[in-house]
């Protein structure tokens, strides 16, 4: 079984630029109303669809409102990603931090309001 998550948005161009230029995603497929992206290692995909497109059924017409969705992107070296994105001028929404349960992470936000947690998993603190 394979899955990709999809977000219905009018911001296809801003979304394409953000994911390809900031996060290094590739374009699997794109047309005038649909964008399918893949992670650099091609292990996961994320899709975006224009709202109210006549080719789509009613279920897939309403636009995402920008709340209630997040993505987690696991990277090998979160410190390097943090410095890279800061140098690029990407707004950091949650500063780099180490959690007692083993996450070292920070968060950014895509043009659609989706929170993106960028994380490297570490061993939890011993208590």
Image (cartoon, helix red, strand yellow):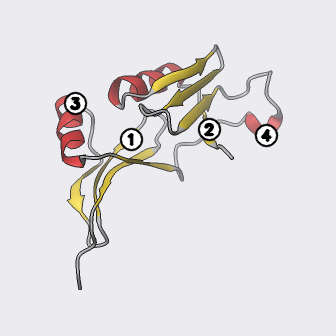
Describe the element under mark 2 as helix, strand or loop. strand
The answer to whether 60 appears left or right of 16 in the picture is right
Instruction: Give the mark, 4 or 2, whose residue is nearer the N terminus.
Output: 2
Instruction: Give the mark, 1 or 3, whose residue is nearer the N terminus.
Output: 3
Residue underneath mark 2:
6
> At 81% across and 35% down in the image, what residue appears?
58
Instruction: Give the mark, 4 or 1, whose residue is nearer the N terminus.
Output: 4
Residue underneath mark 4:
59
For the C terminus, which image quadrant? bottom left
Nearest the camera: 31 or 51? 31
Q: Nearer the viewer, mark 2 or mark 1?
A: 2
Query: Where residue 65 sits: x, y (%)?
Result: 58, 42
Q: Nearer the viewer, mark 2 or mark 3?
A: 2
Task: Answer few, some or many: residues within 10 Å of disc 2's Cα (few below 14, many 20 plus, some between 14 and 19).
Answer: some
Separation of disc 2 and disc 3 at Cα? 26 Å
Position above or below: 77 against 89: below
Residue underneath mark 1:
109
Describe the element under mark 3 as helix, strand or loop. loop
């Amino acid at each position: 079984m394979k899955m990709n998550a999809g977000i219905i948005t009018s911001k296809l161009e801003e979304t394409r630029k953000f994911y390809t230029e900031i996060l290094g995603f590739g374009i699997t497929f794109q047309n005038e109303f649909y964008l399918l992206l893949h992670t650099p290692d091609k292990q996961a995909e994320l899709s975006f669809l224009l709202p109210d497109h006549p080719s789509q059924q009613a279920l897939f017409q309403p636009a995402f409102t920008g709340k209630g969705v997040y993505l987690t992107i696991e990277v090998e070296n979160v410190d390097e990603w943090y410095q890279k994105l800061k140098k690029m001028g990407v707004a950091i929404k949650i500063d780099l931090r180490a959690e007692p349960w083993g996450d070292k992470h920070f968060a950014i936000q895509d043009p659609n309001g989706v929170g993106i947690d960028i994380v490297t998993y570490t061993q939890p603190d011993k208590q």
